[in-house]
Amino acid sequence: MPSADVLIAGAGPTGLILALQLAKLGVGFRLIDEKSGPGENSRAMVVHARTLEFYRQFGFADKVIRLGVKSGVAHIRVKGRPIMSVNFKDMGGRISPFPFALAFAQDDHERFLVEQLKAAGVQIEWNTKLTGIKQKDGTVLAGLALSDNRTQEFEVRYVCGCDGAHSEARKSLEVGFGGGTYEQLFFVADVKVASGFQPDITVNLDQRVLTLIFPVRSSGMQRLIGLVPPALSNREDLSFEDIRGGIESQLELKVTEVNWFSRYRVHHRVASHFRKGNSFLLGDAGHIHSPAGGQGMNTGIGDAINLGWKLAHVLQKRADPALLDSYEPERISFARSLVSSTDRAFTAMTAEDLRGQFTRQVVAPLIFFLGTRVIPHVLFRRISQVEIRYPDSPLSEGKAGKVCGGDRLPWTGPNMDNFAPLRSFDWQVHVYGKPVNDLTSACESLRLPIQSFPWGSSAHNAGFKRDAIYLVRPDGYVALATEAEQASEKINAFVKRHGLCSSAEARSRISI
Ligand SMILES: Cc1cc2nc3c(=O)[nH]c(=O)nc-3n(C[C@H](O)[C@H](O)[C@H](O)COP(=O)(O)OP(=O)(O)OC[C@H]3O[C@@H](n4cnc5c(N)ncnc54)[C@H](O)[C@@H]3O)c2cc1C
């Protein structure tokens, strides 16, 4: 039986990113999936800036960007009439090194991540299903159905349920999944159009329907997502041909080939807990919501990044096990607010009454207009996930300048790129200005690298305070923000409180 400290159930985007992070940090794990290989449907299309920032930490953001299509122009139509084209290019300005959203189909995305794992020497155990979980004292017994039809009881320190909306992990742990299911039926199709590949996005807002088109670079196809007209939504045998006429006239295009057609109902649910004992829920296993804003997959990836380094620290004795207690409060509060905001947006956008029609035909185009021409930064901050923060976390402390403990480290711009050191995926201290005298020796004894940046308008505009000290977590969030005075004492106290130490120190402790 393979030995491992962590069992990851599910090799969707969430499980793949968790696996990549654990591999990078040197943790032994098994990654299983009941399917025979990576997903074959494009599903999630949008990769947001925050996810690309994490991908930069792995060193493959640029590769992913080359495989996708940077969002450029979106054409807005109302009832089939073009009303405006809005430019999304660089809407994030200097907020992120990736001031755009990327269209990258989920099946291509998963295949790419599987390749990265292969390069890291990780074998995914396909055709292997999690059948149940039993909690023991300090470990977990996971029931597995193996690819050769044998069953196995695998004892492991931690189980991570990344097994999607119907999660066996969640059911075995008897964790509730409260919420509901929307009445509306969605369709999704990958098609070729007569006019050839279109790199732009099109949105059609109609009286009863809503349709979006995205580009899929790898296949040269367009991805259509929309609401099935209510009159057809109960048809068991619904096919693309039933909606072809409406789509072609609304979007003024001719579909010449249909690669994939599916329909689905959308749910809005959040698990009552993201952790039970030594088992965790991540991604769709913990939260599902309407596709408004393309947040689902990106949020699952954020869960994986949040948990991965914490598991590695605890397993490698670099932190007190209580570090893992911060996963649920940090991620569940965002999941709850996401489900409720996407629910409000979805309900308003799809209502059949006059209010819904007004939202689709007047409010939504106005939001597009204001969001892209007048206040692009506000819209970008809202949807790109760069605003996710953990102010109430037990790991977040202090404030210096405009930056608080729990904030994502603000980016200082291309001329002074303070995100470059985050590639270490480890703790670091940032100073914008001059480090106080005793900081260097305090950080040396804690083996904490200091990243020093010159003071100037880039740091000021990003919200930093001159000479203040920012202790940054491996996932790029500020843990402690403090004025220069007493910074060494505060860092020492923080490190002590959470039982943190460097990997070298942990290795020497273990060998003792
Ligand atoms: C039709 C459709 C369209 C969508 N469009 C969008 C969109 O435009 N934007 C967006 O952000 N999101 C979209 N989503 C949601 C998005 O696809 C999910 O949020 C994302 O896939 C979540 O990733 P995950 O890894 O958490 O779960 P999943 O992708 O569901 O992966 C779970 C994995 O676990 C495996 N598994 C399940 N049970 C077991 C078990 N018992 N043992 C072992 N393995 C198991 C599965 O085989 C699967 O590989 C869409 C979803 C659907 C269904």
Image (tube, rainbow, N blue to C red):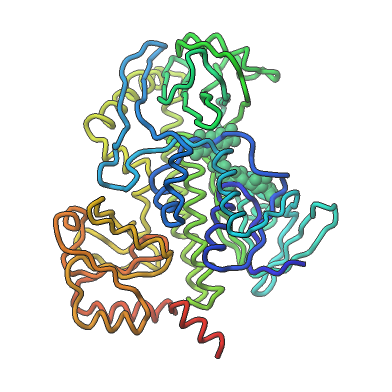
Q: Which residue is more in the foreground, 156 or 454?
A: 454
Q: Which residue is more in the foreground, 479 or 289?
A: 479
* Whether residue 279 is situated above or below residue 373 in the rendered picture: below
Report the side of 378 relative to 150 (left or right). Answer: left
Can you say which quadrant of the picture contains the C terminus?
bottom right
* Whether residue 50 is situated above or below residue 262 in the rendered picture: below
Q: Residue at x 23, y 35 (%)?
A: 375
* Image x and y of residue 190, in percent: 57, 25
Q: Residue at x 46, y 23 (%)?
A: 351
* Image x and y of residue 204, in percent: 42, 18
- Residue 122 in which image quadrant: bottom right
* Image x and y of residue 107, in percent: 58, 38
- Residue 499 in which image quadrant: bottom left
Ligand 1 quarter of the rendering: top right
Report the side of 489 relative to 269 (left or right). Answer: left
Number of marks drawn: 0
Can you say which quadrant of the picture contains the N terminus?
bottom right
Res. 481 visible in picture: no
Res. 489 visible in picture: yes
* Whether residue 179 is situated above or below residue 479 in the rendered picture: above
